[in-house]
Amino acid sequence: MKTILCLTDFTQGAENAAKTAAYFASKLKTNLFVFNSCFTAPVVTAYGGGPWVIDEILERQEQGNHKLKTLKNRLADTMAHRHHDVYHPTIQVECGEGRLGVNVDEIISERKVELVVMGAKHGKQIHNFFSGSETVEVINHAKRPILIVPENIELKDIQNVIFATDFNEEDHKALSYLSEIGLKLGFHIELVHIKLLNKKTIIPFERKLFLDKVFGAHYSNVSFKEFTGKELSKRLTALCEGSNIEILAMMHHQHSFFIRLFQHSVTSEILTHQTVPLLVIPSGMCN
């Protein structure tokens, strides 16, 4: 059976992400695996003797295991109050050592992970989002889609998803995944392209080939719209805020639309003001 992997650091944002992960597990009829990564350091002998780092690590792991059990019980209680005909996923929890990105890669390899869910950074932490944070580490390692859920947002019913495209061939793979999930969860996918003013435009022939392939696949839950704007990030944010959009989805690959979007200083602006969860679909996605 497939698994929804939820990453938690026990913050309020992570709590909402866990509830969202439980929602996906229930709807997709998968297991739910909640993981907390405890980064370890080499043993250092304290003045006067005694490997105090080991004691600190053991204490942190013990606290992590206790918090995981508490979170598991809360999630189980939440699902127990749902209708009797709703699927109740099996919940497993684990506290592991090491870097989060490496742990995620190993978990995906060992388990049939359908989706990775985690809470977004907020406040001052946002400024480090794409400069060595745990979030970017997960994005760089994960071979399955990652749903990054902003604080205070809990997905309970998904009806509309925007997938931003620049007509790259690899976007078809992401769109196929979204369509498959969309049919199970009952949401509509709005394929969106932003034409930037005073920027090089996509060749009409490339656009036509891409869209012909999309609609030739006969997806029952996909439509296409094109918009113009001066700044990519602001236009996408405005689209999400002005519509009933639950998720903004993007493909992640080298020198892609996604990378161009986030390599600029607008990074913190988007994440600060983004009102919907962000679904990152890696181009190296495994089956």
Image (spheres, rainbow, N blue to C red):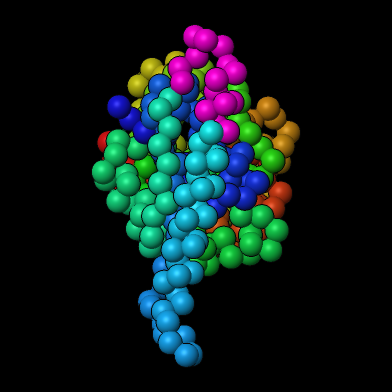
In the rendered view of the protein, which quadrant contains the C terminus? top left
Residue 83 part of the magenta-drawn span? yes
Whether residue 174 is situated above or below residue 141 in the rendered picture: above
Identify which residue is drawn at 40% across, 37% down. Answer: 92
Q: Could you tell me if residue 202 is visible in this image?
A: no
Whether residue 111 is situated above or below residue 216 in the rendered picture: below
Q: x%, y% of residue 45? A: 41, 85
Q: Could you tell me if residue 285 is visible in this image?
A: yes
Identify which residue is drawn at 46% across, 77% down. Answer: 52
In the image shown, does 261 or 286 lie closer to the viewer?
Answer: 286
Q: Which residues are magenta?
A: 74-88
Side of 16 where 145 appears, left or right: left
Q: x%, y% of residue 144? A: 37, 42
Residue 53 part of the magenta-drawn span? no
In the rendered view of the protein, which quadrant contains the N terminus? top left
In the image shown, does 29 or 48 lie closer to the viewer?
Answer: 48
Q: x%, y% of residue 212? A: 39, 26
Whether residue 93 is situated above or below residue 24 in the rendered picture: below
